[in-house]
Amino acid sequence: MKSIKVQFVKLKVSDEKPLVRVTFDTNGLYIINGKEVQLDYGQKISFNEIPKIKDVTLTKEHVGYDTTEGFMSKEDFVNLNNRLKEDGYDNNREIWTDLDKEYLFKKTINNLKPEAKIITNKIITDFEIKETNVFVLDTEDKFIKSDYFFGKDTPMCVFQANEFLREVFLKKCHELKLEEAENKLGNTYHVPTHSGVRFAKISAKYIFDDSFEYKGNVRNTFENILLLKTELEKKVNNKVEQTFRLMNDKKKITDEDLLRDIKNILNEVNKIAPKVGTRSNLESAKRQLNVLITKF
């Protein structure tokens, strides 16, 4: 049986349905969607739907002889031949002792003028085509390139994970309105140009561990890479948001904390013994603190 190779190919990942690309690894006769065609080795044909392909194998069969007296089957011809020469051959060596029989044998065969009748049979076998992984030529994603794009005959893709992580980090930092600065505390960020996010900083501190670093590109199917992208984007965003929240929580003072601090200051001020010329300043400070307390 001949050999074919079937690939399901999307020119763009957004295409609704893949093309069915069939490579015929053996030249010869095929039946494709009911039509008999002769194809060359390596010929490729693309279909919008899964085609019905049948292998056609031609075999030759010697069925008998055409003679001057009509068709004679192989069996009949062999029987006649054997009967006429039974006294004249020994292990295919002529040993005629009866000239009349020898004459009859040769006359009969010559008059029949037998010509071998060969017929051609067609053996038709269906190819079973099952849908497999889809090859993607253009992933429409700047971080994902398909092997097929590089001329490799696999359904795998290459994912530039570090570059993707870097973009996610920068996008989130810009969203939070962080300022780019390498060693400055506060609402700042920094990410080196030579790596992904492993050594990225927020408020001058590293926030990622080794699990956020990839040694080289990731190879997997397009579907699996999409799942990985979603997971990584969520992890980076959560880490940045968590760091930003903790950093700002440390800066916040609650109303209760502020009221307590003001009252403590007032208590200390009340213990101060005024000096000549400063009583009015002391009384002014007390009044201002009491005004602040009444605002809570």
Image (cartoon, rainbow, N blue to C red):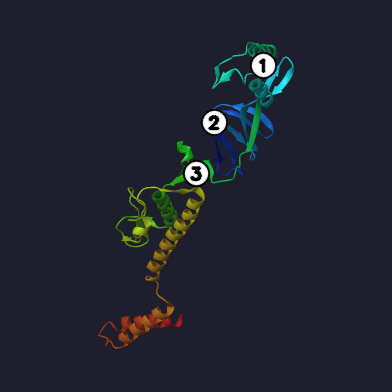
Give the total of numbered labels: 3
Q: Residue flagged by tag 3: what amino acid is it? A: Pro
Element on which disc 1 rests? loop
Q: Nearer the viewer, residue 74 or 213?
A: 74
Q: Residue furthest left?
A: 275
Give the percent coordinates (x, y) of residue 116. 65, 19
Q: Is residue 57 above or below residue 243?
A: above
Q: Which residue is mark 1?
A: 114
Observer-side mark, 2 or 1, equals 1
**Residue appearing at x 60%, y 17% in the figure:** 88
Mark 2 vs 1: CB contact within 8 A: no
Q: To which residue does mark 3 refer? A: 155
C-alpha span from label 2 to label 1: 37 Å
Quick one: label 3, few (<14), some, or many (20+) residues within 10 Å?
many
Task: Indicate left or right for 203 with 58 as reference.
Answer: left
x, y percent for residue 211: 37, 59
Please rate how many residues cluster around mark 1, counting C-alpha atoms within 10 Å: few if below 14, some from 14 to 19, many from 20.
some
Q: Is residue 84 left or right of residue 277?
A: right
